[in-house]
Structures are given as C-alpha cells and as structure tokens.
Image (cartoon, grey):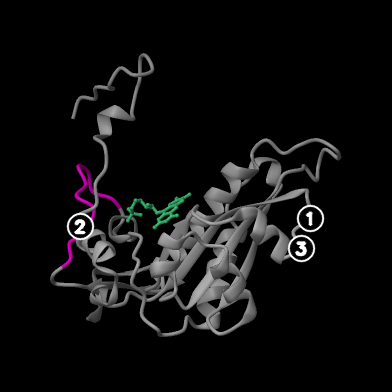
Amino acid sequence: MNIQEWPGGTFSGQTCYKTKQSNMNKTAKTTFEIHPLLRERWSPRAFSNRMVETDKLFRMLEAARWSPSSSNEQPWRFIIGLKGDETYMKIYDTFVEFNQLWAKTAPVLMLSVGHRMSLKNQGKPNVSYVYDVGQAVAHLTIQAMSDGLFVHQMGGFDKEAAARFFDVPAEFEVLTAIAVGYIGDPEVLHPNLKKMEYAERERRPLDTMMFRTKFGTPASFEL
Ligand SMILES: Cc1cc2nc3c(=O)[nH]c(=O)nc-3n(C[C@H](O)[C@H](O)[C@H](O)COP(=O)(O)O)c2cc1C
C-alpha cells in the first residue's frame, strides 16, 4: 500500500496525501466536484500500527479548537488514549463487541465530550453543544486527512462507563469515540468487516436533501 501525493498537488502550502489502494474504491462518487480531502475521506476499520505523530495530533486538536460554535462557547473536550497507555485501554473497554473487533488496530482512541451548560449564560443549558462538538470533530477529521490520517467515529460504546472511568463531571456528556490512524491492511479484519471495508460508499441522492420552495420538494436549479 503506497502513500502518494494528491494528484492535485498541495493545499495551503501543505502536502496532502492519499492512500492508493488499487483494490478498494472508497472515493466518493460525487455528482459535483468537491475538495479532494472531502471526496477521499472515509471511515476505515483497518489501521496500520504506525503511531500517529504528536505534532499531527496537536494539529487535529488545534483544528477542532478553531471551529465555530454557538456564542463561541467551545463546548468540545477530548480525552486522548495512545495505544499502550491506560487511557486507550479504558476507552477500548467501553466499546460494544462489534467496535472492539476492529478498533484495536487503531493507534489512537479518543472520546469527544460536550459541555451541556452555557458558560456565557450561567445556569442555562447550551442547546447547541452536540451540534458544536460534531462540527469540531468534522474539522479535526479533515485536518487529519490533510496529514495522511484517517478518522472513524463511533457511537457504539458505553458512554456512562466512559464518563465514570474518566471522572467526567455531570455538566458534561461523553458523545462519541474516535479512532485515528494511518490506513492499514483490510485483509487482517474479521471476514464480515472485510466485506464492509471493500464496499463502495453510498449516499442518498442530492435532491432528497436539498429544498428551496417547500420541505421535501426537491430543489431545481438551472444548471
Ligand atoms: C456519530 C457517529 C457514530 C458512528 N458509530 C459507529 C460505530 O459505532 N461503529 C462503526 O463501525 N462506525 C460508526 N460510525 C461510522 C459510520 O458508520 C460511517 O461514517 C458511515 O457509514 C458513512 O461511511 P463513511 O464515513 O466511510 O463515508 C459512526 C459515525 C458517526 C458520525
């Protein structure tokens, strides 16, 4: 498996990498052209055992830090486990069996945590915290991609156990788990997972999510 430069060259002065997997077709089949980082992003289950460099991890978190949020509340927090450390094992232990099957290949496991309460309006809930944490993770994901890394988010884990393991205060909610690493060899996966790893990515058509006059009525644009 080679890592090669994007055919399009560099973005913002940084070299972006694409994994070349001749027998896999994970590239989004887009109707309209989108940025290569978005087109090539997918959620792998087979990661290489190469550790993620610390500077790349910091860059991912920096990208999350600079994402927008309602009233600039920045409700995101992250707990980071590196393979071999106790945090990693604690995070892994909370996973449902299906996720444990594959996530053990990831060199980094993280938890995203959201602050339920507003810091600006003391005592009031922040109604946007889930939305904002999701957006921060999206930013982190694309930053990771630009450094040759892949991200796989998970909801299949015991969030209460995770909160207990890490003494997360009641004002905060553990939201997702996030596996990060370089692409690995799909052949090492459980047979059921292997099939998913090789499968093409699918999406519903654009006109089922894009409206202009009335909700549910496909938008028509003169193209
Ligand atoms: C909030 C969230 C929860 C997810 N939970 C899981 C999970 O528990 N296990 C898993 O294997 N994938 C999980 N995924 C990954 C999705 O299945 C995946 O993003 C989706 O199928 C689209 O595939 P793609 O990311 O490769 O385009 C989750 C993704 C998100 C955003």
Any part of residue 67 in sight: yes
Report crowding for label 2: few under 14, some 14 to 19, many 20 or more residues within 10 A (C-alpha). Answer: few
Horizontal side of 166 relative to 60 (left or right) equals right
Q: Position of residue 156 (x, y in %)?
A: 49, 54
Q: Earlier in the sequence, mark 2 or mark 1?
A: 1
Residue 12 visible, this angle: no
Q: Are marks 3 and 2 in contact (CB under 8 Å)?
A: no
Q: Is residue 141 above or below residue 54?
A: above
Could you classify mark 1 by the number of other residues whose Cα lies within 10 Å: few (under 14), some (14-19), or many (20 or more)?
Answer: few
**Image check: 214 left or right of 4?**
right
Highlighted magenta segment, given as a residue range: 24-34
Residue at the (14%, 72%) spot, across then down: 22
Q: Quadrant of the C terminus?
A: top left
Nearest the camera: 66 or 25? 25
| Residue 8 % position (x, y) | 24, 67
Report if the beta carbon of the residue with label 3 is closer than 8 angstroms to ligand 1: no
User: Alpha-carbon distance for marks 3 and 1?
Assistant: 6 Å
Label 2: element kind: loop
| Identity, as a three-letter code, of the amino acid under mark 1 | Pro
Give the label on residue 169, or none.
Answer: 1
Residue at label 3? 167
Residue marked by disc 2 = 199
Residue at 39% x, 68% y: name it: 101
The answer to which of 213 and 189 lies nearer the viewer is 189
Residue 77 placement, left or right of 26: right
